[in-house]
Amino acid sequence: MKIDFNVSLKDLRGKALVSETKELITLRMCAVNAVLALGENDHDMLGEEKVRRWKLAKLIYDGDKEIEISTEDIALVKKLIAKVYAPLVVGQAWEILER
């Protein structure tokens, strides 16, 4: 499945979300941050899973326009974004990832 991770996220009025450093917040940024983050229950994660997440983060980060990504990886990205971000980001991210 092809996903465009360059999509910028918006507030409820449709204005682009920006970080504290005035950088546009994109699905790419959120996905990479979520995939690389360790939650409270992830500290005993096996090395193989950490490498899998690193490779997925690299694929998303290095990707140009649309990225070919498996449905399994999309499900993982959705799950991890939901763990890290508030509803404003999760709702938009899931909407894009479910297209």
Image (cartoon, rainbow, N blue to C red):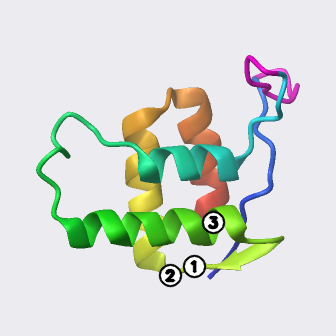
- Are the residues at dot 3 and dot 1 in contact (C-beta closer than 8 Å)? yes
- Residue 59's place in the image compared with 31, above or below, is below
- Residue 56's place in the image compared with 82, above or below, is below
Highlighted magenta segment, given as a residue range: 12-21
Element under label 1? loop
Q: Is residue 13 magenta?
A: yes
Q: Where is residue 27 in the image (x, y as percent from the top left)?
A: 68, 49
Three-letter residue code for mark 2: Ser
Labelled disc at residue 69? 1
Q: Residue at 40% across / 49% down in the picture?
A: 80
- Are the residues at dot 1 and dot 2 in contact (C-beta closer than 8 Å)? yes
Q: Does the magenta stretch include residue 22?
A: no
Q: In which quarter of the image is residue 45?
A: bottom left
Q: Residue at 70% across / 76% down in the picture?
A: 67
Closer-to-camera residue (7/49): 49
Label 1: few (<14), some or many (≥20) within 10 Å? some
Labelled disc at residue 70? 2
Q: Report the side of 91 relative to 61 (left or right).
A: left
Element under label 2? loop
Three-letter residue code for mark 3: Ile
Three-letter residue code for mark 1: Ile
Identify residue for label 3: 60
- Are the residues at dot 3 and dot 2 in contact (C-beta closer than 8 Å)? no
Q: Residue at 82% across / 35% down in the picture?
A: 24
Q: Report the side of 43 relative to 60 (left or right).
A: left
Closer-to-camera residue (19/93): 19
Q: Which of marks 3 and 1 is nearer the N terminus?
A: 3
